[in-house]
Image (cartoon, grey):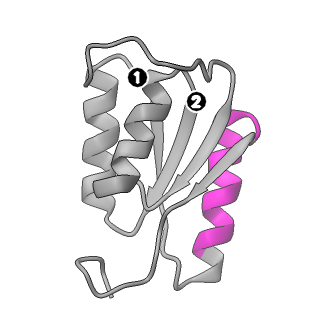
């Protein structure tokens, strides 16, 4: 985690992040929680997602991980429903996930 004060405050904002388990998505999740946002993030890479949520919790930041498979419409709907329930609503979305062959499940 960075040791600097956030440039902006997102305190009270509730944000969903797709593709948040690693890479750019994980950087979004970390930046959001460091700025005070409540975050729920999803990814097909469930082990990595749970590990990031645990890492953030150890650093004093809560982020909710929800398994997400973009190839399954029911999974997408469940992600939004569970994320909104965990956060008490949604103020923003970072739609970072993609269906690729670069290391995800497909």
In the depicted view, which residue is nearer to us: 27 or 85? Answer: 27
Q: Position of residue 39 (x, y in %)?
A: 54, 37
In the depicted view, which residue is nearer to us: 47 or 30? Answer: 30
Point out the stretch of residues depicted in magenta: 75-89
Quadrant of image for the N terminus: top left
**Element type where label 1 sits in the image:** loop
Compared across the picture, whether 23 is left or right of 44 comes to: left
Most common SS among magenta residues: helix
At 56% from the left and 83% from the top, the residue drawn is: 72
| Residue at which label 2 appears | 38
Q: Is residue 22 visible?
A: no
**Mark drawn on residue 61:** 1
At 49% from the left and 19% from the top, the residue drawn is: 7
Quadrant of image for the C terminus: bottom left
Determine if the magenta segment contains residue 86: yes
Q: Position of residue 49 (x, y in %)?
A: 33, 52
At 49% from the left and 62% from the top, the residue drawn is: 96
Compared across the picture, whether 72 is left or right of 98 comes to: right
The number of callouts visible is 2
Q: Using a 10 Å C-alpha cutoff, classify the residue at mark 1 as few (fewer than 14 neighbours), some (14 to 19) or many (20 or more).
A: some
């Amino acid at each position: 985690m960075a040791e600097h004060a956030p440039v902006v405050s997102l305190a009270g904002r509730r944000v969903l992040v797709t593709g948040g388990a690693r890479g750019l998505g994980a950087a979004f999740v970390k930046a959001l929680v460091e700025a005070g946002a409540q975050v729920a993030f999803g990814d097909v890479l469930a082990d990595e997602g749970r590990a990031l949520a645990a890492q953030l919790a150890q650093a004093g930041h809560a982020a909710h991980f929800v398994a997400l498979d973009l190839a399954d419409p029911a999974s997408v709907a469940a992600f939004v429903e569970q994320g909104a329930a965990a956060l008490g609503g949604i103020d923003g979305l970072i739609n970072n996930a993609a269906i690729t062959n670069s290391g995800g499940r497909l």
